[in-house]
Amino acid sequence: MLSHALTIVMNELERHLAIFGPPGSPQVELGNVAEGFRNGGSAGVPRDRIDLSVVNIKEEKTLKNMPNFVRNDVTLKATYENPPVFLNFQVLVVATHINYLNALLALSRTIRFFQFKNVLTQDSVDPASITKNQPLNRLDRLETFKLIFELYSPTMEEVNHLWGTLGGKQYPFVLYIMRMLDLKFQTTDGECSLVSEVVSNFAHKTAVR
C-alpha cells in the first residue's frame, strides 16, 4: 500500500511538472537516494529528476487505541479484527539535476505543487494517477485514501545526520511528512451476533427456616 500511495503521488506530481518540462520526458522517480546516482550504468537514482525517498516511518500514537470490532446494525453482527496501523512517513524530495539552477527550478515547482494540493484523496486526484503503475496484486492497492502532506523543516544537525546516513553529498531537497496511511490486512478474527434483547426475570426465593 505504501508503494501504491507513493506511486499516486508521483503520478500527480508528474502531471504538474509536465506543464513546465518537455512533453514525454519523465521528471519524477521513486528511488532510494542511498544507492547513489546513476552515471552511465543501470544502478542508482537517475539524474535530472525529482526523486522521492522514504527516510523514516512513525506510528500515529493518537489513533492507537481503537476498538477491535466493527458493528453492523444491518446484519446485527459484530466482526472482530485487529485495528489498522496508522503511519506517518517522512518523504525526502531531492532534485538530482546536474545543473544547479535547473535543480532549484524543479524543487520550487514541487514545493508549489504540495502548497496547493497538500491533501490527496481518491476523489481529488486524476483517475489515471491511481491506475498507472499500480501494484499487480489487488491486496497491495489502496481503495480509499487520504494523504496529507506537511512541510518539515529539519535543523542543520538533522540535515547533517540525514545526509550522513544516506552516505552521499547533499543535494537540493525538501522534506515532507505524509500523513496518514492506514495499513491493514483484509481478514477477520471472528464474528458473533449482537445482543438484541435483554430479559430480566427476578423471583424471590423462599426463606429458609
Image: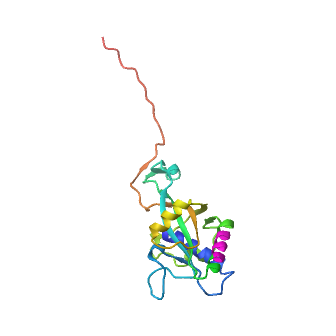
Prevalent SS, magenta region: helix
Residue sitting at x 55%, y 76%: 131
Residue 43 occupies quadrant: bottom left
Query: Is residue 103 visible in the rendered structure shown here?
Result: yes
Residue sitting at x 60%, y 86%: 25
In depth, the one of 83 and 110 nearer the eye is 110
Residue 127 occupies quadrant: bottom right
In depth, the one of 2 and 45 nearer the eye is 45
Residue 41 occupies quadrant: bottom left
Q: Position of residue 116 (x, y in %)?
A: 69, 67
Q: For the magenta stretch, what is the residue range?
A: 104-113
Q: Is residue 31 left or right of residue 127?
A: left
In depth, the one of 206 and 170 nearer the eye is 170
Q: Is residue 196 left or right of residue 120?
A: left
Q: Position of residue 105 (x, y in %)?
A: 66, 77
Query: Is residue 1 visible in the rendered structure shown here?
Result: no
